[in-house]
Image (cartoon, rainbow, N blue to C red):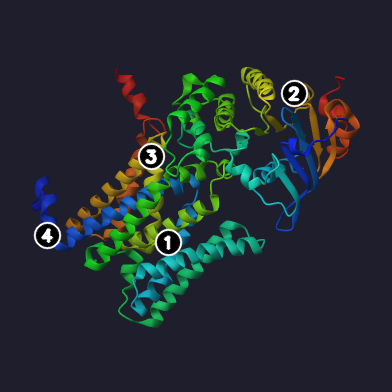
Amino acid sequence: METINYQNFRIEAENICVDYNGKVALYDANLRLQPGQICGLVGMNGAGKTTFFNALTGFVNISKGKIRINGESVRSAQKDQTIAYVPQNEGIDSQFPISVWDVVMMGRYGSMNIFRCPRESDVQAVKDAIERVDLTDHLSTPIGNLSGGQRKRTFLARAIAQRASILLLDEPFSGVDIRTEKLISELFIQFKNEGKTILLSTHDMIHVREFCDLVLLINKTVVAYGETSEVFTPENITTTFGGISPDFLFGPES
Amino acid sequence: MELCSFLTLDSFITDPLTHDFMRKALLMSSFVAAVCGFLSSYLTLKGWALMGDAVSHSVMPGVVVAYALGLPFSLGAFIFGVGSVALIGFIKQKSRVKEDTVIGLVFTGFFALGIVLVSKIKSNIDLHSILFGSPLGISLSDVKQTIFISLLVVILLSIFRKDLMLYCFDPRHAKTVGINVFFLHYLLLTCLSLAAVVGLQSVGIILVVAMLITPGATAYLLTDKFDNMTVISVLSAIISSLIGIYVSFWFDLETGGSIVLAQTFIFLFAFLFAPRYGIFKLKKLFAGYK
C-alpha cells in the first residue's frame, strides 16, 4: 500500500449522504480517486449511481459528509471547469434543434464572458475536440440526425473541449456501435495518459474488467471498493445485485 | 364596412391605418407578438406549456386588484404570476400530489379568485376585455406600458439567450460548469409572467397561452437550428397578429380569437407541409417533379 498524499486526490468523497424529500438515495458513501485512475461505478438501477454523479457535480446537495475536488469545494470545481459530465443518451432531448458544433461549444460556456461569445481559442478547442471524436464531417448536423454512437461522441467532445480533469460518464457504452466503442476505449487510454480521472457507470461487466483500474460497487451505500482484480468478485457482485448470482448476469463464461 | 372596399389589397391594408385605434392596436400587438414569439421557443423546448397556461391564468386576481387600487395592472399581474409559480413549487415539494395536478389546482384557484373579485369589486373593470383582450380599445398609456415591458423582456432574453438555451437543453451540464441554474430558472419564469401580462392585452387571459406556445411549436416543425427557430417563431407571431387584427376589423370579429386562429392556421400549415417534419413533406413532393 502506497502512502496516501491527501493533496493528490482528484476526487475525495467522505461519508456522503443524499436524500430527496426524506427518501435516502445514498448514505455513507466514500470514494478516493487519483489522477490517471479509471473507476467503474457498478450497481442496480436505483442503487444511487446517478445520485453519486449528481453529488459530485453539485447538481444535488449532500445532506451529510464532505466532497473535495482537487482539494477544493464542489463550488470552486464548477467555477474551474474541473468536472465534465457525459450524460446517458436517454438523458438528453435528441430532438432539440441544435447542431454538433453548438453542443461541443457548450463545453466552453463556463469559461466565456456573459454573452458567451466564442473567442479564437474556444473555436480552436471545439474544432480539436470534434476531430478527436472523428465527427469533423458532421459539424453542422443536428443531433437528431446522428446515430446513438455519434451522439455519444458529441457529448464526449463537449467534455474534451471543456478541458476538464475529471470525467463522469453515465453508461458510456450503452447503445453505441462497435466503431464508437473502439474510439471511446482509445480515448480512455489517452485520457489516462493525460492524467485525467474517469468515473464511469456501466451495466456491462466485461467493460469493467477491460478498462477499470478500480471498481466501486454500490447499493445505496458502498458494497465494495478497490482494485478491480481484488474487489470484482462473484460474491461482491452478488451482494451488489441483491442476491442474483453472477452466472446469471455474466452468462456462464468464466 | 362595405365588402367591396377591400377589393384592392392596397385599401385593405391602408384604410384601417387611417384610424388611430387601429394604428395603436397594430403597433402594440406587434410588440406583444415579438415578445411572446421569442419566449415561445424556450417554453416549447423546455416543455413548459402547462406552466405558461398556469401563469397566464393566475395573473387574473392581480389585474383586478391593481385596477381597484389604481396601480398599473402589469404590477399586480406580475406579482400574482410569480406568486403562483412559487406556490406551485412549494405545494409540490411539501406534498405527495403530482406536479401537473398541483399546477392545475393552483391556477384554477387563482383564476376563480379573480372572477369572484371582479363580481365583488364592481368597479369599471370590463371582465370581457380581461378575459378576451381588447387590442382595439387600448389606451395610449397601456400602449406605452406594453412597449416598455416588451423591450425589457426582449433585452433580458437577448442577453441570456445562449444560457437559457443551455438551461433548456442540459441543465446538469450548465450546473457542472458553474452557470447559475437557479437564476436562469427564475429569469425564465419572470419573463413568462411579464409576457403573460402583455399578451393578455392582445388576446385576453384565456387565450394568452396560445401566444406563448403556438409560434414556438410552428417554428419547431420548420427548422433544426435554434436561432432560426427563434426568428421563425417571432415572425409567425407578428404575422398572425397583423392578420388577426385586419380580419377582425373588416369582418367585425373578436380580435383576440382572430389572432389565435391565425396562429393555429399557420401551425396547421406547417404541420401538413413542413419540408422535413410535415405530414406531406413538401421537399419530397417537389423532388418528385424534377
User: Are the residues at dot 1 and dot 4 in contact (C-beta closer than 8 Å)?
Assistant: no
Kindly state the secondary structure of the residue where label 3 is placed: helix
Rendered view: B101 above or below B157 = below
Residues B126 and A180: in front is A180
Q: CA distance from mark 4 to mark 3?
A: 38 Å
Between disc 2 and disc 1, the foreground one is 2
Residue at the image position 71 percent from the left and 32 percent from the top: A200
Is tag 4's residue or tag 3's residue first in the polypeptide sequence? 4
Chain for numbered disc 4: B
Residue A14 percent across, percent down from the top left: 79, 46
Which of B195 and B13 lies nearest the eye of the viewer? B195
Q: Visible in this render: residue A220?
A: no
Q: Which image quarter: residue A239?
A: top right
What numbered label is drawn on residue A211?
2
Mark 4, mark 3: which one is toward the viewer? 3
The residue at the point 26 percent across, 47 percent down is B239
Chain to which the residue tagged by mark 3 belongs: B
Of badges 2 and 3, nearer the viewer stands 2
**Circle 2 chain:** A
Left or right: residue B134 versus residue A188 is left
Q: Are marks 4 and 3 on the same chain?
A: yes
On the image, numbered disc 3 is attached to which residue?
B229
The reply to whether the C-beta atoms of the residues labelled 2 and 1 are less than 8 Å apart is no
Residue B158: give x, y in percent of width and height: 38, 47
Helix, strand or loop at label 4? It is loop
Q: Amino acid at mark 1?
A: Ser
Disc 1 residue crowd, few under 14, some 14–19, many 20+, Cα 10 Å: many
